[in-house]
Image (cartoon, rainbow, N blue to C red):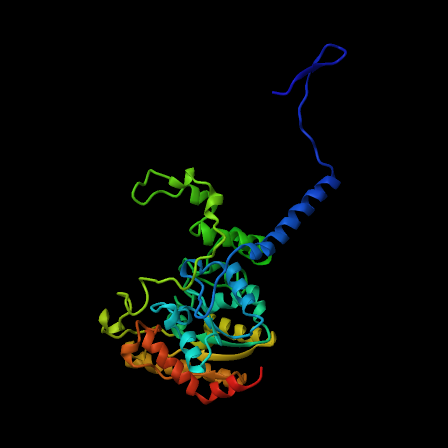
Amino acid sequence: MAPDHTNKQGERLLVTNEQRLDLRQWAVVLALVALVALVTPRLWKHLERFDTGSDYRIPYQLSNDYWLIEWRMQQTAAAKPVAVLGDSVVWGEYVKADGTLPHFLNRQAGQAERFVNAGINGLFPLSLEGLLRHYGGALHQRKVIVVCNLLWLSSPKADMQDDKAQDLNHAALVPQFCPNIPSYQADAGARLSAVIGRHVGFFAWANHLQCAYFNQQSLTRWTLDADANQPMCHPNSYRNPLGQITLAIPSGLADDAARGPGSARHKPWTAHASHTMAFEWVKLDSSLQWAAMQRTVGLLRARGNDVLVLVAPFNENMMTDAGRDTYRKLRGGISAWLDQQHVPHVVPETLPSELYADASHPLTAGYEELARRICQDEAFKAWYLAVP
């Protein structure tokens, strides 16, 4: 308690330690805070260990760590390898890091790090556009392959035209206000937070800490996390949060029991579903995802990138006859637009049925065959050998 004093009239006065800052002092405080927010993320890269190497891919649990993804792109800027951009078809949903499309493209090229796996699990064209627009500046003036997965055009829901709200992967990357995305129904606060997070590096860095060290949770939620075996027990409440920060980013090359030829998931699609599906293909001229892909190609070319689009071969074996016809017309329309825009592209035919794990993801042998076909394509050869 603050001490009591009396004035000349004998009245008791309460003395406090309160101090009010004037405008000049507030300016100094704000300047110091801004300096810390600006410098900390940059200094952090000199403190944290980030091992990559050939076949590196962003770990599954760090798929929402856009600060780390940007750092990875910056790492590769000097050598300028070919970045292979896309969703889990690039990343390799059912395969190990050495069983992906970039791995087999490297094998075809005879160079271990000529092609870099820049795929992110759960990414879709609307979010790929946002990732490159706000975090992909380091990719300028180099060759890139953009993989177009037609899975995102296989229904109004996948295209996000559906009026029913969806919990979107990478919601922070999609356009927040324009164009309107019917399936994305976040409130104004969430949208503004996403916009601010894109432009303030400190917030992206703070999200990196949450993703890398606190199980993708805020510090408060991590502290209150319950033990899986004892729901009423909160072990993190007794732990020092600083002890979680090991300054070593999880490796993307660790063995993964859920992926690769030895896993239970690495099986042909016919092992769990032998019937065909009636996909509800959307039209190109009304597709939100295709419009985002077009903007992405335009953005990359405006930055001086030498772009090649790979239209990933969808598993036609899963389609009905009518659906297959619609799909092929859709694929033809995409190829026609790329021709009109003079964008080099490769449109491989569908792979043998046994090389698919589902509608769009190949198995390890499927990626190997796909890489072989790509490298034999005349359009790819001309693009790859041309000076960027």
Which quadrant is the N terminus positioned in?
top right
- Left or right: 303 as drawn, with respect to 380: right
- Left or right: 365 as drawn, with respect to 66: left
Give the farthest residue toward the bottom: 378
Q: Is residue 228 above or below residue 3?
A: below
- Left or right: 312 as drawn, with respect to 178: left
Say which residue appears at 46% left-offset and 54% top-offset. Answer: 212
Give the farthest residue toward the top: 10
Q: Is residue 18 above or below residue 385?
A: above
Which x, y percent locates residue 79?
Answer: 56, 73
> Foreground residue, 30 or 247?
247
Which x, y percent locates residue 204?
Answer: 54, 55
Say which residue appears at 40% left-offset and 72% top-offset. Answer: 153
Classify residue 122 by image quadrant.
Answer: bottom left
Which x, y percent locates residue 258?
Answer: 31, 62
Q: Is residue 310 visible?
A: yes
Say which residue appears at 26% left-offset and 65% top-offset. Answer: 264
Which x, y percent locates residue 242?
Answer: 49, 44
> Foreground residue, 212 or 359?
212
> Foreground residue, 289 or 312?
312
Classify residue 357 by image quadrant.
Answer: bottom left
> Foreground residue, 98 or 194?
98
Which quadrant is the C terminus positioned in?
bottom right
Give the farthest residue toward the right: 8
Classify residue 260 by image quadrant.
Answer: bottom left
Q: Is residue 154 visible?
A: no
